Image (cartoon, rainbow, N blue to C red):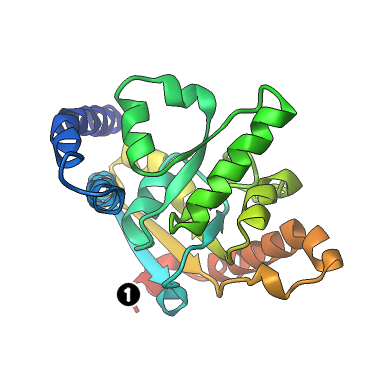
Amino acid sequence: MLIILKIKVISFTILHFFLLPYVFFLKLFKNYKYINSYAHKIAKNWGIKVIRWSKTNVKIIGTENLPDHPVVIISNHQAHFDIPLLFAYTGLSPSFIAKKELGRIPLFATWMKILGCIFIDRSSARKALISFQEGAEKIKNGQNIIIFPEGTRRREILPFKKGSFKLPLMAGVPLLPVTIIGSENIVENVKKGLTTDVMIILSKEVNIHEMNKDQLKEIHNDIRDMIVSNFEKYSKKNLSEVLKV
């Protein structure tokens, strides 16, 4: 079952490369905002398809906390499926931070750029700073960005890296804590032919403009505490029962 899912996802992803000529054609007549919006509609559809094919039921809690202004989404990272989940179900047309090396992959990098991904060059402190400054401007201009401050995927929530918050602090936009529960079970359940229940909790945004220097120094720990609190609160419940609500 997992092999079939992989083939479907890879094939479906590759098919999107054939849309690039049309996107380039649109650039002749449409502005960046229109192209970016079009690209995110495609990304959302891709995410929905991937999650449906994996037989995953998704429950969103906290939709009333969805903002109408740019934010940086801070999320725990359980599995590869977190990316299609956030594309499909947050409703925020998000993009991601990526290593500059990914920006060199033909076709794939083109889509990432159209979606508004921010490529970070860490080859030197100066280049990294320039990357952060450019990324901060992109966020201020309306691009919502997702950051996984753990730096890797784990079933448990690892400490958040303080450096992950440098970009949102430079952008000066609110932070939106997001908790993902259950995505780490998708692969094993696909292998067994079972469905998976996943929950996404959207917390109230955190306005960093209202914080003093001492609070900003601990922002990475405070946001982690919020996400861990939600993770523990909802993990104790039967997700199947919550999904019925």
Confirm whether residue 165 shows in the render: yes
Pick the quarter of the image with the C terminus: bottom left
Q: 125 above or below 88?
A: above
Which of 172/45 is in front? 172
What residue is rendered at 86% in x and 65% in y?
A: 214
Q: Would residue 100 appear left or right of 223 to someone viewing this image?
A: left
- Going 63% across and 36% down the picture, which residue do you hit? 130
Residue 171, compared with residue 184, is above or below; it is below
The x and y percentages for residue 222 are 74, 64
Quadrant of the snapshot with the N terminus: top left
Q: Secondary structure at mark 1?
A: helix
Q: How many marks?
A: 1
Is 83 placed left or right of 215 in the picture? left
- Which picture quadrant has residue 229? bottom right
Q: Note whether 16 is above or below 234 in the view shown.
A: above
Task: Name the residue tied to disc 1.
Answer: 244
**Residue 129 horizontal side relative to residue 27, left or right:** right
Residue shown at the point (53%, 62%) measured from the top left: 178
At x 37% / y 36%, what residue is drawn? Answer: 112
